[in-house]
Image: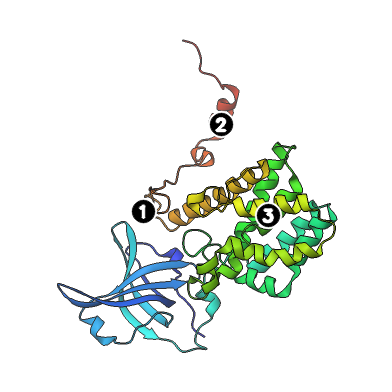
Amino acid sequence: MTNKTCPIREFRTGQEVEGVFVLVQARQAASRNGPYWDLRLQDATGQIEAKIWSPLSSEYTDLKAEQVVRAKGQVRTFREQQQLVLSELTHLQEGDFDWSDLLPSSDPPPQELLQELQGLCRRELAHPGWKKLCRDVLGDKHTRERLLAAPAAKAIHHAYRGGLLEHTLNVARTCLALCDQRPDLDREILLVGAVVHDLGKAWELHYGVAPEYTDSGRLLGHIFLGLQVLEPIMSRIQELDSELLLHLRHLILSHHGEFEYGSPKRPKTKEAFVLHFADNLDAKLNTVDAALEGREEDDPWSAYQRSLERKVYRASSTGDSDKGRDSSSKSASKRCLLPLKE
């Protein structure tokens, strides 16, 4: 069994690296210096563009997406993005690598996220109908298998194994935190809405080397697919009256917020607004985290993020500003909180 000597997440410009990767993209192109291979490599920690320049490129004739390779090269920067210029590449056979090293996954692992989500429902839900709904959804073997593997999106946010569970748990926690500030909100239906709002993504997206839409995902979308899964479950639960089910359906149908973002309906209850913004907030923060991940320490700006229509900045934290200050200066700052008069 081969072992990676350096994961993509730890690549630094100028570094000579070696590792085991799966090819996400492999295409031939031409430059003034001759033909070359334009590649995208992936391991469990991320992806990176890679090049095999001429004349070395002529030694490789059958590179294809989803092949697993051991590669060696130097990390460089091109147009503000890291790029690996390869000096060596060899194909690996099944059994010479572990797929868990190559497919990005949530941290904590998906199984732990599912257990935490189930525990949150047991602790927070008192209504027997809501308890039964979440238990039936999260406890179904077929649904669990899909949830454990599902990403939350194809590319923009949480696009990795367990990403859907990570996103769902984050949205649920955000909704509960807002309920602590606003006791007038229906805490239980918001938690249930958070748990099932993106359920259809487990059927909309297939997760292999890279997330890809299923046929039903392309034709129907995750909002319809989620309701399709939920309807027979909801119809069996006698403890849920028609008004509660109507509200839950509205939460699911409106969680994208606006028509232009694929929402069949816009939010029309307080809980629907909360779920929409909690969903959007977690997606945006995950996108920012991914944009800043792997940046050089002396470069706080990300590359341009098309989905956000901007670059993002890694700001110094309050804790960082205290580094290097001795205890006496910290004590003095605590004693004098207002500017002195001259």
Is the residue 14 above or below the residue 28 in the image? above
Distance (Cα) linking label 1 and label 3: 39 Å
Q: Earlier in the sequence, mark 1 or mark 3?
A: 3
- Camera-side mark, 1 or 3: 3
Please give the label number shown on residue 303: 1
Q: Which residue is mark 2?
A: 330
Q: Amino acid at mark 1?
A: Ala
Q: Is residue 13 left or right of residue 93?
A: left
| Circle number at residue 114 | none
Q: CA distance from mark 3 to mark 2?
A: 53 Å
Q: Viewer-nearest of labels 2 and 1? A: 1
Occupied quadrant, residue 295: bottom left
Number of other residues with Cα within 10 Å of mark 3, as a class: few under 14, some 14 to 19, many 20 or more:
some
Q: Amino acid at mark 2?
A: Lys
Residue at the spot 41% in from the left edge and 82% down from the top edge: 69
**Which residue is rendered at x = 49% and y = 87% of the image?**
96
* Residue at disc 3, secondary structure: helix
Q: Are marks 2 and 1 in contact (CB under 8 Å)?
A: no
Location of residue 303 in the rendering, given as x and y in whole percent from the top left corner: 36, 53
Marks 2 and 1, the one that precedes in the sequence: 1
Q: Which residue is mark 3?
A: 249
Observer-nearest residue: 116 or 199?
199
Please tell me whether residue 153 is drawn above or below residue 42 in the rendered image.
Answer: above
